[in-house]
Image: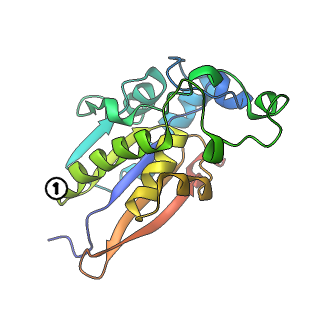
């Protein structure tokens, strides 16, 4: 019997051309770069510490490819709720570019025109969290930067814009858990990229 509370392990996809250039990548379905593929393969060792009752992935290529290369392609279930935020008119643009016409713009404060609101993404995160908690066992998620940051915020009971507090690198591993008999959600670890070091 497992002595600790069930954990939800979050994996952000490996590097793509746009993650490297800091372009907002929502629904544009980019593949991993070769370096991103190597990053994904390096996830096998740290993820081997768990035995997952379920593995869920965003259906977008960069997350799905990361999932497959990490060794979970044969057991993963695609979940549309794990897709990245729809950036609307800001798809493919960098924050610096957006701020040339909106100097004080941030995603967390101002959102995106003709895209998803943080509340809509938060509702998707809440559905994933509810499904994961219902399993009462360890779950592995492959998804995207802003989606996982918002999911972590919602796990901790913060509003969706609480995701601004959590930096998240490509091919990172983060762990959500709980204490006090499962009553207190906690952040077990965040943005672990030690497996990517030579």
Q: For this rendering, which residue is in front, 140 or 47?
A: 140
35, above or below 195, in the image: above
24, above or below 196, in the image: above
Q: Which residue is mark 1?
A: 134
In this rendering, would 93 be left or right of 27? right
Quarter of the image where the N terminus is located? bottom left
Q: Residue at x 31, y 61 (%)?
A: 7
Counting from the top left corner in percent of width and height, residue 34 is at 60, 22
Counting from the top left corner in percent of width and height, residue 159 is at 47, 57
Counting from the top left corner in percent of width and height, residue 152 is at 45, 56
Query: Residue 100 sits in which quadrant?
Result: top right
93, above or below 139, in the image: above
Q: For this rendering, which residue is in front, 39 or 56?
A: 56
Q: Residue at x 41, y 46 (%)?
A: 122
Counting from the top left corner in percent of width and height, residue 38 is at 56, 31
Q: Residue at x 54, y 17 (%)?
A: 30
């Amino acid at each position: 019997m497992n002595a600790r509370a069930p954990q939800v392990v979050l994996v952000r996809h490996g590097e793509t051309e746009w993650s490297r250039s800091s372009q907002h990548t929502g629904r544009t379905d980019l593949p991993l770069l070769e370096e991103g593929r190597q990053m994904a393969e390096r996830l096998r060792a740290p993820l081997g510490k768990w035995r997952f009752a379920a593995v869920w992935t965003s259906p977008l290529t960069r997350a799905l490819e990361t999932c497959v290369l990490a060794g979970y392609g044969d057991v993963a279930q695609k979940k549309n709720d794990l897709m990245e935020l729809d950036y609307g008119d800001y798809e493919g643009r960098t924050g610096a570019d957006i701020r040339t016409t909106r100097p004080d713009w941030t995603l967390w404060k101002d959102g995106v025109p003709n895209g998803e609101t943080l509340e809509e993404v938060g509702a998707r995160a809440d559905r994933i969290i509810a499904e994961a908690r219902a399993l009462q066992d360890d779950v592995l998620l492959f998804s995207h930067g802003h989606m996982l940051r918002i999911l972590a915020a919602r796990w901790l009971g913060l509003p969706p814009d609480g995701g601004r507090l959590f930096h998240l690198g490509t091919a990172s591993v983060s762990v959500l858990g709980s204490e006090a008999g499962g009553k207190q959600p906690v952040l077990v670890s965040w943005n672990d990229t030690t497996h990517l070091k030579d």
